[in-house]
Amino acid sequence: MACVVLSFLTILPVVMGDITGYLGDSVTLSSGANSSWILSKIEWSIFSNITWIATYREGTLHPNTDRFWQFQGRLRLNISSGDLEIRDVRIGDALVYSVLLKDIKGEQQNKNLRLTVTERLSKPSVRKVFSMLKDSHCVMALQCSSSVKDTHLSWEPEAAFEDAFWRRNPNTNVSVVWTSYSPNRNATFNCTASNGFSKASRVVTERCQEPDVVGETRFPGIAFVMLLFGIVFGCVLTYCFRVNYFPCINFLNFVFMCKMTCLKLL
Ligand SMILES: *[C@@H]1O[C@H](CO)[C@@H](O)[C@H](O)[C@H]1NC(C)=O
Ligand SMILES: *[C@@H]1O[C@H](CO)[C@@H](O)[C@H](O)[C@H]1NC(C)=O
Ligand SMILES: *[C@@H]1O[C@H](CO)[C@@H](O)[C@H](O)[C@H]1NC(C)=O
Ligand SMILES: *[C@@H]1O[C@H](CO)[C@@H](O)[C@H](O)[C@H]1NC(C)=O
Ligand SMILES: *[C@@H]1O[C@H](CO)[C@@H](O)[C@H](O)[C@H]1NC(C)=O
Ligand SMILES: *[C@@H]1O[C@H](CO)[C@@H](O)[C@H](O)[C@H]1NC(C)=O
């Protein structure tokens, strides 16, 4: 009797801890036992009516982890540390857990833990809205989005990126970055999704190439056709100036159009 009173008196004050678990993952609730303790009793419970979910008594071979239907087959109790592992975490597991520990010397300790359950963020998705080469500048817009609601998205360029960029979040789950950078080099951007509990990033590298100047040596056939066009154009021009005849001007226009189309195709 004296022993019971003594152990009751030496019970340590309740401490509250917070822990985050991710849906479908495992989470370990720490009992907070002093590592020098040899545990003779472990009682993990939920609710104010102290519904046991996992217990251990000195002298028994195994802890009892199938005390409550909600956690059937999902608990693992470490009898030396008192820590409770919950596997395949579900939304309903977001509760306040209490653990009562007793050391073989009779000392007792109680701890409460609040488990928050959240979705582990997957990498955000990135889409190239447009990319073009204009006046020797690559102009590009990238959009980052997440299917998980209440996700904050942000774009960051790689440290070495020195060109201009603008960022906007038109929507809570969408972030856009516009940039104008020099061609023939990489532009690397990192989109990070975060919800206060976890983060996930996706890195994209884009590059635009300035087209090579068409070398005549590389396309001798085309150069020949161009030369032919030039001669015909020249001849017709000379003829038209001499005759100054209207249909001739139209023909000249036609040739000119042909030439421009050919240039565009190149
Ligand atoms: C663990 O218990 C020992 C002996 O009771 C004590 O000296 C030590 O400070 C305790 N450690 C912690 C972290 O409470
Ligand atoms: C304890 O409380 C929970 C929820 O409030 C209830 O579902 C459960 O039946 C109660 N257990 C006992 C033994 O009263
Ligand atoms: C139980 O906890 C102790 C101390 O934290 C650790 O060394 C041991 O590996 C754990 N046992 C299992 C089966 O996880
Ligand atoms: C962004 O969230 C809205 C609702 O908040 C949703 O309709 C839309 O589909 C989401 N966009 C993406 C890309 O997930
Ligand atoms: C540019 O990116 C490509 C692939 O995205 C990579 O192979 C190449 O090494 C990068 N170049 C530089 C200079 O970082
Ligand atoms: C992307 O950004 C996140 C968050 O800032 C960071 O943890 C990660 O290392 C970055 N990745 C790269 C490749 O820069």
Image: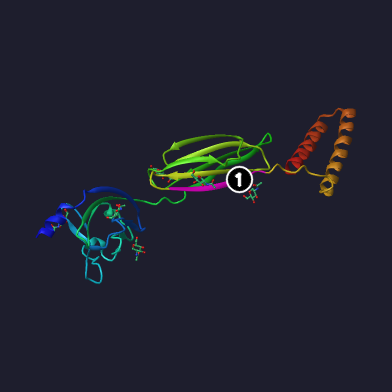
Question: Relative to residue 212, is residue 79 drawn left or right?
Answer: left
- Looking at the picture, how far across and down is residue 263, in whole percent? 76, 40
Quadrant (top left, top right, bottom left, bottom right) of the N terminus = bottom left
In the picture shown, does residue 30 fall above or below 226? below
Q: Residues within 10 Å of mark 1 (few under 14, many from 20)?
A: some
The residue where tag 1 is placed is 206
Q: Is mark 1 within 8 Å of ligand 5?
A: no
Residue toward you, 49 or 101: 101
In the picture shown, does residue 224 fall above or below 250? below
Residue toward you, 20 or 174: 20
Question: Relative to residue 28, is residue 145 drawn left or right?
Answer: right
Type of the residue with mark 1? Glu
> Magenta: predominant secondary structure element?
strand
In the picture shown, does residue 29 fall above or below 137? below
In the image, what residue occupies the spot 37% across and 51% down? Answer: 119
Residue toward you, 80 or 129: 80
Question: Relative to residue 81, is residue 206 drawn left or right?
Answer: right
- Looking at the picture, how far across and down is residue 96, in whole percent? 24, 51
Quadrant (top left, top right, bottom left, bottom right) of the C terminus = top right
Examine the rendering and report whether any part of residue 49 can be seen.
no
In the image, what residue occupies the spot 28% across and 52% down? Answer: 94
Which span is picked out in magenta?
Answer: 199-208
In the image, what residue occupies the spot 42% across and 50% down? Answer: 121
- Looking at the picture, how far across and down is residue 135, in whole percent? 68, 34
Provide the secondary structure element on which disc 1 rests.
Answer: strand
